[in-house]
Image (tube, rainbow, N blue to C red):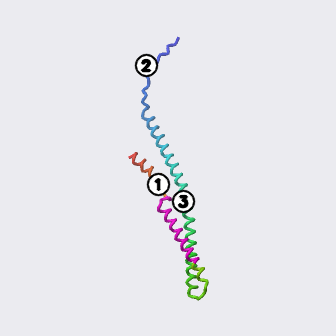
Amino acid sequence: MANHQPHPNPEPTNPGLVAGLLGIAKNLLGLIISRIELASLEMSEIGVNVIRFLVIFMLGAIALWFAVAFWSVLVVFLAWEAWGWKILLAFGLFFTLATLGLAWYARYILTEGKLSLRTTMTELRKDRDALL
């Protein structure tokens, strides 16, 4: 009959240097993955805002060209004594107001910081401060 006695010197519960380093590496990898996920989420939001900004910019440029064209034609028609200048005045005012509205909206997008990685940069600063 075999005697199954517990080992007199059980191994210590301290995991050791290698296991500790592996734990740190695992946590660091998890942190890096979460930051990459956060950055990709914000990049997709920025992509939508960049496309929106480009569309607004192009519409603003088109409206500006129409405003210049109609205001120029208005000056010509005002020099002549004709009744057609009133419709050109209306078109000139409309496209001028459209250009101002689009420029205001584009400025709003830029000043609100919708083209930046606010949350990702904040988290990266926190990570840097925690590691240093």
Residue farthest to the top, as pictured: 1
Q: Could you tell me residue 71's position as x and y percent? A: 55, 80
Q: Residues within 10 Å of mark 2 (few under 14, many from 20)?
A: few
The residue wearing badge 2 is: 8
Tag 2–tag 1 contact (CB < 8 Å): no
Q: Is residue 105 above or below residue 28?
A: below
Q: Is residue 128 above or below residue 19?
A: below
Predominant SS of the magenta segment = helix
The residue wearing badge 1 is: 118
The foreground one among 85 and 71 is 85
Q: Is residue 11 above or below residue 32?
A: above
Range drawn in magenta: 90-115
Disc 2 marks a residue whose amino acid type is Pro
Local SS, label 1: helix
Please identify, in this view, whether the residue under mark 3 or under mark 2 is nearer the observer: 3
Q: Could you tell me residue 14's position as x and y percent? A: 42, 30
Residue farthest to the left, as pictured: 132
The foreground one among 110 and 35 is 110
Q: Residue at x 42, y 32 (%)?
A: 16
Q: Is residue 102 magenta?
A: yes
The residue wearing badge 3 is: 49
Position of 132 with respect to 22 (left or right) is left
Q: Earlier in the sequence, mark 3 or mark 2?
A: 2
Disc 1 marks a residue whose amino acid type is Arg
Q: Residues within 10 Å of mark 3 (few under 14, many from 20)?
A: some
The foreground one among 34 and 4 is 34
Local SS, label 3: helix
Q: Could you tell me residue 105's position as x and y percent? A: 52, 65
Q: Earlier in the sequence, mark 2 or mark 1?
A: 2
